[in-house]
Image: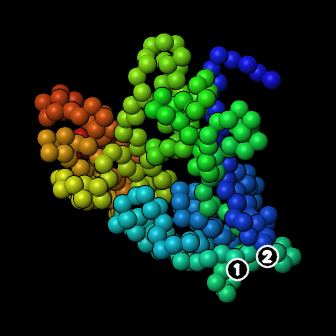
Amino acid sequence: PHTAENIVISTGQHPHRLDIPGTELAHDSADFMNLTHLPANITIVGAGYISLEFATIANAAGAKVTVITHGDKVLRKFYQPYVEQIVADLKSRGVDFINNANVTSFEQDDRDFTVNYDGRTVKTNWILDATGRVPNVDGIGLDKVGVDYSEKGVKVNDHLQTNVDNIYASGDVIDKDQPKLTPTAIFESTYLMHVFAGDTSDPIDYPAIPSVVFTSPRIAKVGVCVEEAQKNDLTIKENHLPDDWYRQVTKESIGDNALIYDKQNHLVGATEISDQAEDAINAFLPAIVFKFEPAQLERLVTLFPTIAADAWGQI
């Protein structure tokens, strides 16, 4: 056993597995990344990051890809008009989507497999279960020491402290609203470092945390989303990026962004679909986090021509 003045639970998550007959026949994201030979036909069950990113990769590498989703939407936390462009593009590349499907079992026939759903079947060479990730809370002694947790993760207060005074949690294992991403975990661990060093006793103050899905094109966002802006009557400025001369250099045919402004005309959110959405959102990030005023924006002279220069020119 290990003892310490303070203990931090940072056990992360593991891939979810469908609780259906034949679930052992499916693979997870690690199995996909470790493939040494690409199956000719891949079926992916799921509607999130992993499903869409790996569908993009497998399709680009030459596999026939079928994506099966439980609902009628994918990437539900992203702006759906942009998501629909991604889905339409994937379909044009040959990816099949089966929506509103209740997957009931997986079966094996020699070296091939069958996905059963709603009385129908899909024949495939390889199955990826991309139905989400689950916090690693089992088998680590939480019940023994009395730490509260749920299926969503370890419960913490605004100091990342559990109900046991000297036990904290950080990263994807936490039950939280913030995106469960590596940079979020780093931010939380850095905060705890300062707490333990006596540098602060303040509660954690999360900044705007960006998210990206590495499809082709990418979709990324940070801060206030379009739907929230519409509900609160905030200003939304939209740009069709292929009209921009810099984007024409790489002949981007798909590209849009929506910039969200508060009542004081501060940039408070951004969502983009483009081949370089992740870099554009990173460029918008300082203005959103620090609520730059117009005079401060004018002081920023970027390298040109770059995506950052293009992004700053849109604010």
Residue at the location (37% across, 55% down)?
274
* Measured Cα–Cα span from mark 2 to mark 1: 8 Å
Q: Is residue 16 left or right of residue 258?
A: right
Of 154 and 199, the residue lying toward us: 154
Disc ID at residue 41: none
The one nearer the camera, 109 or 75, is 75
Residue 132: percent from left, percent from top: 60, 57
Quadrant position of the N terminus in the picture: top right
Q: Please say if the residues under marks 2 and 1 sit with CB atoms less than 8 Å apart.
A: yes
Quarter of image, res 305: top left
What's the residue at 64%, 84% (across, down)? 118
Q: Nearer the viewer, residue 13 or 237?
A: 13
Question: In this rendering, is residue 41 above or below 147?
Answer: below
Q: Secondary structure at mark 2?
A: strand
**Residue 38 appears in the picture as rendered:** no
Q: Is residue 253 left or right of residue 24?
A: left
Residue at mark 2 = 107
Q: Is residue 219 visible?
A: yes
Of labels 2 and 1, earlier in sequence is 2
Q: Which residue is mark 1?
A: 116
Task: State the image coordinates of residue 177 (x, y, percent, origin top left).
Answer: 46, 46
Q: Secondary structure at mark 1?
A: strand
